[in-house]
Structure formats: C-alpha cells, structure tokens
Amino acid sequence: MKCSDAKRHMSSYLDAAVTRSHMSALQSHMDSCRSCANYFIGLQRTQAMVGALGRKPAPSDLTLKLRVALSQELANAKRSRWEALRVRWENVFNAVMVPATG
C-alpha cells in the first residue's frame, strides 16, 4: 500500500468505517511506515481534542428560525395566494405566541 492511499483511508479507519481487509492492510502499512504511523497518531489526538470540546447547545430560537425559513420557502413556491397568506399568518401568530407562552 502506498502512503497516499493509506493517508486517504486513515480517517475512515479511525472511525472503524473500513472493511476488515482495508483495516489489516492499513495496520500492516503503519507497522512498517513510521511517517504514516505518526500521521495516524496525529489524527487520533485531533479526534480526542475535538471530542473533549463537547457538544454546543443549539440556540434557543433555532426552531423558530427554521419554521420561518421553511414557511418562506413554501410561501415562495407556486401556491395559491391564500395558501401563502395562511402560512405567513401562522408564522406571525407563532412568533407572537411562543414568547408569550414563555
């Protein structure tokens, strides 16, 4: 296996998303190639650091923003004028009611 092939598949190897034959080929290549082994160690460290960051919580208004964006798409689609007006009215109503219930 060439180093370029090995490096291309290392991320998948790290995620255990390669076949058993690719896994053994990559492992044997890294056993004999110090450069690729060091590259893989760097990938492992990067994955560990990113994992240590944790998940960032979604913004509290994300749901509302998504609803508005989706309804705008629906309103802009070729629909009847009344349908577009109904969707816009629902958005205005929901935007007022969500904070009011909070």
Image (cartoon, helix red, strand yellow):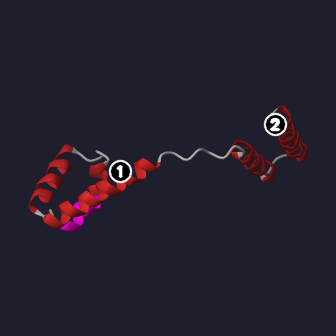
- Res 90 label: none
The image quadrant of residue 97 is: top right
Q: Which residue is mark 2?
A: 98
Residue 52 left/right relative to 72: left
Label 1 sits on what residue type? Ala
- Percent position (x, y) of residue 49? 38, 53
Quadrant position of the C terminus in the picture = top right
- Mark 2 neighbour density, 10 Å: few (under 14) some (14–19) many (20 or more): few
- Mark 1 neighbour density, 10 Å: few (under 14) some (14–19) many (20 or more): few
Magenta span: chief secondary structure: helix
Label 2 sits on what residue type? Val
Quadrant position of the N terminus in the picture = bottom left
- Percent position (x, y) of residue 13? 26, 50
Whether residue 84 is visible here, answered yes or no, is yes
- 86 and 81: which is toward the camera: 86
Magenta residues span: 3-9
- Percent position (x, y) of residue 55? 51, 45
Q: Residue at x 21, y 63 (%)?
A: 38
Sequence-earlier tag: 2 or 1:
1
Q: Residue at x 19, y 50 (%)?
A: 22
Q: Which residue is mark 1?
A: 48
The kind of secondary structure element at disc 1 is: helix
- Residue 96 lies in magenta, yes or no? no
Residue 90 left/right relative to 48: right
The image quadrant of residue 32 is: bottom left
- Percent position (x, y) of residue 21? 16, 47
